[in-house]
Image: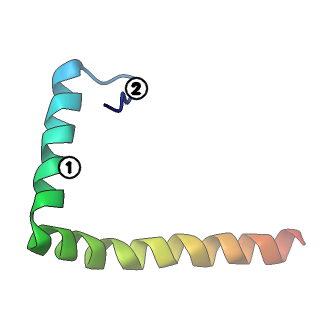
Amino acid sequence: MTHIAVLGSTNMDLVAYVAKARAAAASPSVRRVGASSSMPYRSEIDAQAASNNRHSA
């Protein structure tokens, strides 16, 4: 079992988080929606990182 330590979070928060993560992993539709909605955010972060690297190089 993986132990995750999150600062400032209670045990119940962690239990709820793990339960949500398991529910999402068990449901293909939820996983698909989550992936597609997080993609723009990720590419936004990547674009920012790439631009930061160009400026600092």
x, y percentage for residue 22?
16, 49
Q: Are marks 1 and 2 in contact (CB under 8 Å)?
A: no
Q: Which mark is residue 5?
A: 2
Q: Tag 2 or tag 1, which sits nearer the N-term?
A: 2
Residue drawn at x 17%, y 30% as measured from the top left = 15
Q: Which mark is residue 21?
A: 1
x, y percentage for residue 53?
78, 71
What is the crowding at mark 2: few (fewer than 14 residues within 10 Å), some, or many (at least 20)?
few
Residue drawn at x 36%, y 22% as measured from the top left = 8
Residue drawn at x 36%, y 27% as measured from the top left = 3
Q: Mark 2 is on which residue type?
A: Ala
Q: Is residue 17 above or below residue 22?
A: above
Residue drawn at x 20%, y 49% as measured from the top left = 21
Image quadrant assignment for residue 16 = top left
Q: Is residue 35 left or right of residue 42?
A: left
What is the crowding at mark 1: few (fewer than 14 residues within 10 Å), some, or many (at least 20)?
few
Q: Mark 1 is on which residue type?
A: Ala
